[in-house]
């Protein structure tokens, strides 16, 4: 039995990178057939976007902006050139955000992640992600069926009926949140139901701590996690090496400083930005609002794609100070105006029943003049006063936080 889905997963990293960026200009040309992308990329030579450095010059599209953008031009905000009827399924997720499914096999690119989790042809899969209006259930369903699995479209909840399905069909694999798998296991143990046929699981949609993974393993279930979204499908997935999540094929992942589109150095925590090479429904630099960091080197499982550490928090760190919002974009602008600064962190606390801001800034050349200049820039940009503390390079936490709200209220 092969350990990889296909040879693309083990090709030379430079070969993969060259292939992705050779294809990117044509994807961009497809994208600008849609009016909103055409406006966003107006005046840009799309043929020149053939490297990560060139891609980083394009504007970021924030997922948090999609509800408002779509509302102005229903259903997809002018980001899709084809008619809704040309797609396979149409969905809505909280926001609301309107999403679509392509007509190709495995449109969400989930088969690779399921294969890495041990799913194989002929397996019976219990899929407990929702099939109602949102794409979650179909993301897993389409990938499992592309592998040749039979899928029980169980959806979430109703544990008693789930037990009946499991005892009748004897599924060997589970898809769903880790929380619901624990509910099933605990409920079955309490009710004396037999769900021991489940031997592997692909979980997503919630935190999956090592303690829970070990609990599942102690009950004979090898479980792996995937990072996926309702817009993009599978972005990255865990393998038997358990040394980070492997970035899926046919997508480009960047990790940028929150509030900007500027890539961070490898290993630094930043916001996940994804570009998909799907000519029917391309996403170009979609910022997901989630934090992660790249893992250096190649996975011990043999897959050579970029790896990420998984979900490490949210990048949307806007905070209201003295009645005014302070946003990561503003902190990033301070860094742009003072290139001698490194990592920045705006810390918000309470003193004497009042909000207080302190900007910590790394620099190799601290001085009173620099501190005063940065403080003046902070006041100009944020319209609020704050103190400045200059720190040595590498001394601030590498956790992706640009704004740390440490206020405590009794």
Image (cartoon, helix red, strand yellow):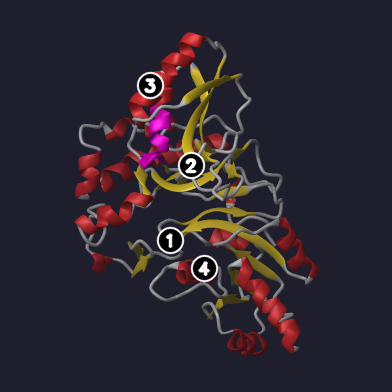
What residue is rendered at 61% in x and 33% in y? 397
Tags 4 and 1 touching, CB below 8 Å = no
Residue that label 4 marks? 140
Q: Which of marks 2 and 3 is nearer the N terminus?
A: 2
Residue 346 x, y percent position in the rendering: 49, 32
| 231 left or right, relative to 122 | left
Q: How many discs mark residues in the rendered view?
A: 4
Which quadrant of the figure has residue 293? Answer: top right
Vertical side of 92 occupied by 382: above or below: above
Q: Which of marks 2 and 4 is in front?
A: 2
Looking at this view, is 193 or 54 the one in front?
A: 193
Vertical side of 129 occupied by 406: above or below: above
Which quadrant of the figure has residue 389? Answer: top right
What residue is rendered at 52% in x and 36% in y? 352
- Could you tell me how far apart the alpha carbons at marks 4 and 1 are, in whole angstroms? 11 Å
Give the extent of the magenta segment. 321-333
Q: Nearer the viewer, mark 4 or mark 3?
A: 3
Vertical side of 371 occupied by 354: above or below: below
- Could you tell me how far apart the alpha carbons at marks 2 and 4 are, in whole angstroms? 25 Å
Q: Check residue 377 in the rendering and tell me which mark sits there, or answer none.
A: 3
Residue that label 1 marks? 230
Residue 59 x, y percent position in the rendering: 32, 37
Q: Nearer the viewer, mark 1 or mark 3?
A: 3
Q: Which of marks 2 and 1 is in front?
A: 2
Q: Earlier in the sequence, mark 1 or mark 3?
A: 1
- Could you tell me how far apart the alpha carbons at marks 2 and 1 are, in whole angstroms? 17 Å
Q: Which of marks 2 and 3 is in front?
A: 3
């Amino acid at each position: 039995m092969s350990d990889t889905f296909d040879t693309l997963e083990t090709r030379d990293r430079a070969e993969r990178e060259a292939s992705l960026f050779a294809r990117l200009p044509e994807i961009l040309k497809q994208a600008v057939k849609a009016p909103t992308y055409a406006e966003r990329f107006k005046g840009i030579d799309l043929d020149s976007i053939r490297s990560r450095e060139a891609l980083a010059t394009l504007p970021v599209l924030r997922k948090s902006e999609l509800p408002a953008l779509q509302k102005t031009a229903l259903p997809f905000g002018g980001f899709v050139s084809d008619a809704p009827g040309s797609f396979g399924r149409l969905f809505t997720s909280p926001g609301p955000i309107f999403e679509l499914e392509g007509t190709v096999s495995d449109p969400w690119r989930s088969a690779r992640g399921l294969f890495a989790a041990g799913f194989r042809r002929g397996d019976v899969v219990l899929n407990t992600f929702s099939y109602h209006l949102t794409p979650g259930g179909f993301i897993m369903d389409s990938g499992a069926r592309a592998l040749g699995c039979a899928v029980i479209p169980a959806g979430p909840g109703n544990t008693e009926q789930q037990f009946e399905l499991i005892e009748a069909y004897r599924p060997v694999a589970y898809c769903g949140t880790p929380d619901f798998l624990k509910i099933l296991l605990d409920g079955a143990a309490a009710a004396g139901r037999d769900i021991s046929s489940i031997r592997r699981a692909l979980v997503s949609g919630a935190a999956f701590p090592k303690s829970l993974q070990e609990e599942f393993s102690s009950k004979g279930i090898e479980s792996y996690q995937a990072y996926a979204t309702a817009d993009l499908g599978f972005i990255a997935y865990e393998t038997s090496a358990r040394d980070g999540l492997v970035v899926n094929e046919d997508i480009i992942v960047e990790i940028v400083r929150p509030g900007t589109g500027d890539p961070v150095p490898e290993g630094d925590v930043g916001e996940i930005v994804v570009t998909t090479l799907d000519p029917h429904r391309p996403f170009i630099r979609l910022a997901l609002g989630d934090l992660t960091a790249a893992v250096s080197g190649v996975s011990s499982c043999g897959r050579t794609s970029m790896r990420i550490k998984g979900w490490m928090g949210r990048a949307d760190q806007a905070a209201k100070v003295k009645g005014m919002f302070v946003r990561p974009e503003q902190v990033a602008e301070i860094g742009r105006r003072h290139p001698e600064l490194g990592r920045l962190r705006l810390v918000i606390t309470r003193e004497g029943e009042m909000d207080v801001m302190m900007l910590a800034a790394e620099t190799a050349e601290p001085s009173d003049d620099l501190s005063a200049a940065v403080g003046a820039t902070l006041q100009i940009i944020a319209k609020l006063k704050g103190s400045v503390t200059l720190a040595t390079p590498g001394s601030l936490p590498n956790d992706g936080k640009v704004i740390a709200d440490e206020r405590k209220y009794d």
